[in-house]
Image (cartoon, rainbow, N blue to C red):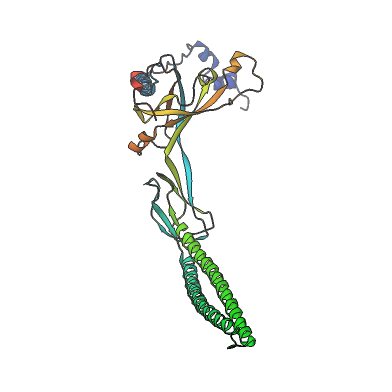
């Protein structure tokens, strides 16, 4: 009973049969080979991909059309850059507390406009003290001048008495002793007059010093009123009301809108023909249909990005010279809000005066 028959042993699946899904090997060998099913195609994915590609191509074409550079005839050079303007820091002259702020970031301001005031209570107290000292010196000076007038009268009287005594001595109506006394009185009156004149000079100097103190305090108070040195735009407000700043503490940083320029880098072949004063145009990306009149104000005398050893033509092509192109000041005054520092654009320079500007870059010459 414990012996397994061949039939029962053959019914037990082997490892190969288990690997074939539990079927006998003979059965698996008789089955046809399994062919994997082909993946289902998704035509809608291809349609979307093609549609997105068309949109990208259309967008790229539109961007190129809007930002393309107009065809330039001979006699012109072109370079890319950003508008820049000189930064001016509006800072305190003395340490103190900010009492008032009258401007904010982005405001257009005019030269002489008050943008902030510092607390000047201590300076005003010093000013009152200096004014009181000046008034005291003025009264002392007036008193000294009165003393001079009095001494002048004493000198006049002493001279008259001396002259009369001198006339009476030869006639015997006055003694020599009386004449000497009159002479001593005359000398004393003259000495007192000289002393009075010296005191007048002393008080005049004292009054002048006191007045200088008053003037200095007034200047210090005026310097604590922060005004705009030139027309421009407030770029940053760096402090607020109530803050205590050290001497030289910055309250605002402004941009000088009267000096707006673009620095571009031109290769040697172009930079060598560009001269200061050459006519130029700046086309901003944001204002592609409005060329801005400008002038070349500076051409760098030395190249930048230059290799140490310039041997071949390919290396010479790497020589780049910085050229500064300044926007016409009248243009800035007419459109101060349109021309802003930091805006990217393209600068066109005419180095041949006989060349004519393309239609897209027509405009009045820069000043």
| Vertical relation: 280 (above or below) 127 | above
Image x and y of residue 219, in percent: 47, 59
Q: Quadrant of the N terminus?
A: top right
Residue in front for this viewpoint, 69 or 293: 293
| Vertical relation: 179 (above or below) 313 | below
Residue in front for this viewpoint, 55 or 145: 145
Q: Residue at x 63, y 84 (%)?
A: 180
Count of marks placed on residues:
0
Q: Residue at x 34, y 21 (%)?
A: 360
| Vertical relation: 135 (above or below) 319 | below
Q: Residue at x 60, y 80 (%)?
A: 188
Image x and y of residue 150, in percent: 50, 79
Residue lying at the far right of the rendered structure? 309
Q: Quadrant of the C terminus?
A: top left
Horizontal side, residue 92 vs residue 42: left or right: right
Residue in front for this viewpoint, 226 or 137: 137
Image x and y of residue 166, in percent: 58, 81
| Vertical relation: 36 (above or below) 155 | above
Image x and y of residue 93, in percent: 51, 56
Horizontal side, residue 36 vs residue 201: left or right: left
């Amino acid at each position: 009973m414990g012996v397994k028959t061949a039939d029962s042993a053959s019914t037990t699946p082997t490892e190969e049969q288990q690997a074939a899904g539990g079927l006998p090997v003979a059965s698996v060998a008789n089955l046809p080979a399994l062919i994997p099913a082909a993946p289902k195609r998704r035509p809608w994915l291809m349609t979307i991909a093609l549609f997105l590609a068309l949109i990208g191509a259309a967008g790229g074409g539109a961007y190129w059309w809007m930002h393309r550079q107009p065809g330039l005839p001979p006699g012109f050079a072109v370079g890319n850059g950003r508008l820049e303007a000189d930064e001016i820091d509006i800072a305190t002259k003395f340490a103190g507390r900010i009492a008032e702020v009258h401007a904010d970031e982005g405001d257009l301001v005019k030269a002489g406009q008050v943008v902030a005031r510092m607390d000047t209570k201590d300076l005003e107290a010093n000013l009152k003290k200096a004014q009181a000292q000046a008034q005291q010196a003025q009264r002392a000076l007036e008193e000294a001048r009165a003393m001079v007038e009095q001494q002048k009268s004493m000198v006049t009287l002493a001279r008259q008495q001396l002259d009369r005594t001198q006339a009476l001595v030869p006639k015997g109506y006055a003694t020599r002793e009386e004449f000497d006394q009159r002479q001593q009185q005359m000398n004393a009156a003259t000495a007192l007059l000289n002393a009075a004149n010296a005191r007048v000079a002393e008080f005049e100097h004292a009054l002048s010093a006191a007045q200088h103190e008053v003037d200095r305090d007034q200047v210090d108070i005026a310097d604590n009123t922060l005004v705009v040195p030139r027309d421009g735009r407030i770029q940053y407000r760096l402090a607020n009301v109530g803050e205590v700043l050290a001497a030289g503490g910055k309250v605002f940083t402004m941009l000088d809108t009267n000096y707006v320029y673009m620095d571009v880098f031109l290769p040697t072949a172009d930079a060598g023909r560009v001269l200061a004063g050459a006519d130029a145009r700046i086309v901003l990306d944001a204002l592609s249909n409005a060329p801005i009149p400008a002038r070349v104000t500076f051409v760098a005398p030395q190249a930048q990005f230059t290799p140490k050893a310039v041997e071949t033509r390919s290396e010479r092509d790497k020589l780049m010279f910085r050229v500064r192109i300044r926007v016409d000041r009248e243009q800035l005054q007419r459109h101060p809000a349109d021309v802003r520092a930091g805006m990217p654009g393209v600068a066109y320079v005419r180095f041949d005066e006989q060349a004519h500007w393309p239609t897209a870059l027509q405009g009045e010459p820069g000043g």
